């Protein structure tokens, strides 16, 4: 028996897809790419945007038309947020939501044995616990993503995720330690802690995110700990100071901005203003040497006029982001923003996206240029198409070097010699240095 998986969306979704692969493998399935013939296809959906829903429906139709005798299962955020819409998709033989992943393999087996169509979407409940799951391996052999939090209760005006993911719940510390120790024994050098609203980790346990960070950094064999996307206003100065005492914690922080205009942020129901965001970014930069602040920026939110966009654009340049994911607002049925007045025309959103991207590419280039002349520990991961070997510094600068020896999986000190577009080129020093992450002139 063969099973194939197709996953859309965030790192949490990718982590959960890995858990599903482990469950199906334990049930006797051989895991194959979704482009190959299989007995079962599982689509792990994302519903952040309406475009994500469209991709899910297209893939459902494609897989069923190409493999009419296979069982096709739809799971994840889309059916959880829109159960009635998912129930009406005839190509899906099994439909489940974002809860109870441990049941999916059994439901698929039932559908294969009986031929019945199964819809089993269980609503979220107050007080539900963190779903037990422990990743054992990933296709990427150097970095492991570890889901430590699920759910969100922030209710941003544009976001359907609180409906799809339910209340905040967190992985218990002993479960987190056991998972990290297993990954370390499997050879992973870096652990990335991820969650739907990662900053809320521990709310249900009487803990805070810093507690998970300190625990992860204490695990022998894990040499780097990195954080996923963060809601900025939940990072206190005390937490940042405690984080700065952990030498394993990577100085790269993805603080979700969305807009640099206070009026826009208020309509979005974000819980900070531009000044607070700048203060938190400044605190991180004071506490972490050579710190990278990255973000997401939305343009064209309902009611955003040219003056508001200009404020957001100026803030993005002023805050000197190391990298930004810029995207246009997409109307999401089921959210408050979908019915707000002042919907911005598509052409205007596209023009603003282009201007914001141009600005953030300039700040990105300045950040990469500032890395030139430094020596950095690089965790190597892969080869590029032209034969160079690529990895990442602690602050997530992509670095490529030319070397005959295989470097994947190793952490090597590299001297950064130039910046090219979205990456830096480096050289392996002929003699090991006694210091890393310092400017050459300071050695």
Image: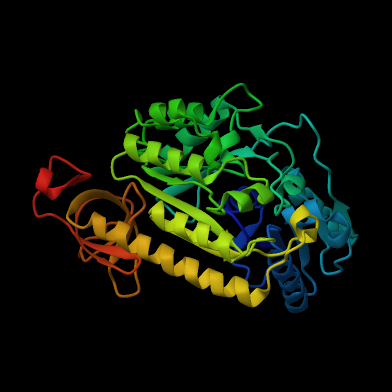
Q: Quadrant of residue 427?
A: bottom left
Which image quarter is the C terminus in? top left
In this rendering, would 195 be left or right of 358? right
Residue 419 visible in the shown view:
yes
Q: Quadrant of residue 415?
A: bottom left
* Image: 296 above or below 170: below
| Residue 68 on image: x %, y % | 79, 75
Q: Residue at x 91, y 60 (%)?
A: 116
| Residue at the front extreme, as displayed | 307
Q: Nearer the viewer, residue 416 or 266?
A: 266
Which image quarter is the N terminus in? bottom right
Q: Nearer the viewer, residue 154 or 403?
A: 154
Q: Nearer the viewer, residue 128 or 25?
A: 128
Residue 218 visible in the shown view:
no
Colour logic = rainbow
* Image: 200 above or below 427: above
């Amino acid at each position: 028996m063969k099973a194939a998986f197709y996953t859309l969306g965030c790192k949490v979704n990718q982590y959960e897809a890995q858990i599903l692969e482990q469950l199906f493998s334990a049930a006797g399935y051989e895991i194959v790419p979704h482009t190959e013939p299989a007995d079962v296809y599982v689509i792990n959906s994302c519903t952040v945007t309406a475009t994500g829903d469209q991709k899910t429906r297209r893939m459902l139709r494609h897989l069923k038309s190409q493999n009419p005798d296979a069982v096709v299962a739809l799971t994840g955020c889309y059916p959880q947020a829109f159960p009635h819409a998912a129930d009406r998709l005839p190509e899906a033989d099994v439909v489940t939501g974002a809860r109870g992943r441990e049941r999916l393999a059994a439901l698929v087996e039932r559908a294969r044995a009986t031929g019945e169509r199964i819809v089993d979407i269980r609503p979220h409940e107050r007080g539900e616990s963190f779903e037990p799951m422990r990743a054992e391996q990933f296709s990427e052999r150097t970095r492991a993503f570890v889901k430590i939090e699920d759910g969100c209760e922030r209710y941003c005006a544009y976001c359907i995720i609180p409906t799809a993911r339910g209340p905040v719940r967190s992985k218990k510390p002993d479960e987190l330690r056991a998972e990290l120790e297993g990954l370390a024994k499997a050879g992973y050098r870096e652990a990335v802690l991820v969650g739907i609203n990662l900053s809320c980790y521990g709310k249900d346990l009487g803990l805070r995110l810093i507690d998970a960070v300190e625990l992860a950094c204490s695990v022998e064999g894990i040499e780097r700990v990195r954080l996923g996307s963060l809601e900025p206003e939940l990072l206190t100065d005390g937490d940042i100071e405690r984080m700065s005492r952990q030498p394993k914690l990577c100085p790269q922080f993805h603080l979700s901005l969305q807009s640099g205009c206070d009026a826009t942020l208020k309509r979005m129901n974000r819980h900070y203003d531009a000044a607070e965001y700048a203060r938190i970014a400044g605190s991180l930069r004071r506490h972490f040497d050579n710190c990278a602040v990255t973000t997401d920026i939305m343009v064209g939110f309902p009611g955003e006029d040219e003056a508001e966009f200009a404020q957001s654009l100026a803030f993005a340049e002023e805050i000197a982001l190391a990298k930004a994911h810029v995207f246009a607002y997409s109307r999401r049925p089921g959210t408050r923003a979908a019915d707000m007045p002042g919907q911005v025309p598509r052409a205007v959103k596209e023009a603003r996206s282009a201007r914001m991207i141009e600005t953030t590419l300039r700040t990105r280039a300045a950040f990469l240029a500032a890395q030139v002349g430094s020596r950095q520990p690089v965790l190597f991961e892969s080869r590029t198409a032209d034969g160079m070997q690529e990895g990442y510094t602690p602050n997530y600068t992509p670095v490529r070097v030319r070397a005959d020896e295989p470097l994947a999986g190793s952490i090597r000190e590299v001297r950064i010699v130039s910046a090219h577009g979205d990456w830096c080129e480096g050289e392996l020093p002929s003699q090991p240095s006694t210091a890393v992450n310092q400017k050459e002139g300071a050695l």
